[in-house]
Image (cartoon, grey):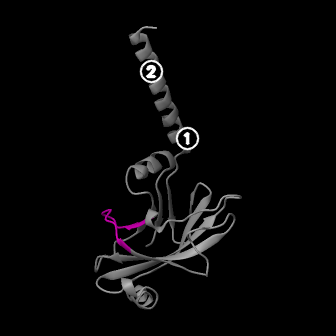
Amino acid sequence: MTISRGLAVFGAAIVGILIFLAAVAILNRRDQSEPIGGEIRIDDFGFTAQRARWKQEASDYCKINAPESAGNGESVVVTLKVTNYAKRVDFTFRPETVFLIDREHRRATRLAALPLDGKSFHNIPAGSDALVDLVFRVSSGDQSLLIFSFGQNGFLDVLDDVFFGKKQIRLN
């Protein structure tokens, strides 16, 4: 086999792989945008923003439950239900994969992730769920926050968007 023939076979294999990946992306990709109370499904896991507390209600909550987050600026507290629909696999929820962003796509600062209902959200057994309050600091007076997004922050975000679609929950 000559070098040019080998390069042609290699090039054809690369093109074949790219066509396969494009087909998977086209057939599998589904954007999903839900209001508060709607569930986002990613693989065997569900995410539901049950409520969002703004301004004074969030500030009062932070003073009691997350004193390290009380201070300058306004807070938003989002109660998130994380459901593991898998039959055999536990799910490790990482709060750092959830972002609160505004219409200009600026991210709010995440201040705390507090477990509710006595269950740990770090390891959710198969077939169960957990509640977590996510506390974010937003710019003072910024009422344009509306999207609750799931992603990995970076290159994996791009892959998630290409293959699985954008997943977001509108908070207002």
**Disc sitting over residue 10 in the figure:** 2
Query: Type of residue at label 2?
Result: Phe
Question: Which x, y percent locates residue 13?
Answer: 48, 23
Above or below residue 37? Residue 28 is above
Q: Nearer the viewer, residue 4 or 86?
A: 4
Quick one: label 2, few (<14), some, or many (20+) residues within 10 Å?
few
Specify whether 92 is left or right of 160. right
**Disc sitting over residue 47 in the figure:** none
Specify whether 50 is left or right of 135. right
Give residue 143's quadrant in the image: bottom left
Question: Which x, y percent locates residue 56?
Answer: 38, 89
Mark earlier in primary sequence (2, 1): 2
Q: Which residues are magenta?
A: 98-110
Q: Secondary structure at mark 1?
A: helix
Q: How far apart in space, not on screen, are marks 2 and 1 (Cα)?
A: 26 Å
Report the label total.
Answer: 2
Give residue 73's quadrant in the image: bottom left
**Disc sitting over residue 27 in the figure:** 1
**Residue furthest to the top:** 1
Query: Type of residue at label 1?
Result: Leu
Give residue 63's quadrant in the image: bottom left
Above or below residue 17? Residue 34 is below
Question: Which x, y percent locates residue 72?
Answer: 28, 84
Verify whether residue 125 appears in magenta: no
- The residue under the point 39% across, 11% down is 4
Specify whether 81 is left or right of 78. right
Above or below residue 132? Residue 148 is above
Above or below residue 12? Residue 49 is below
- The residue under the point 45% across, 45% down is 162
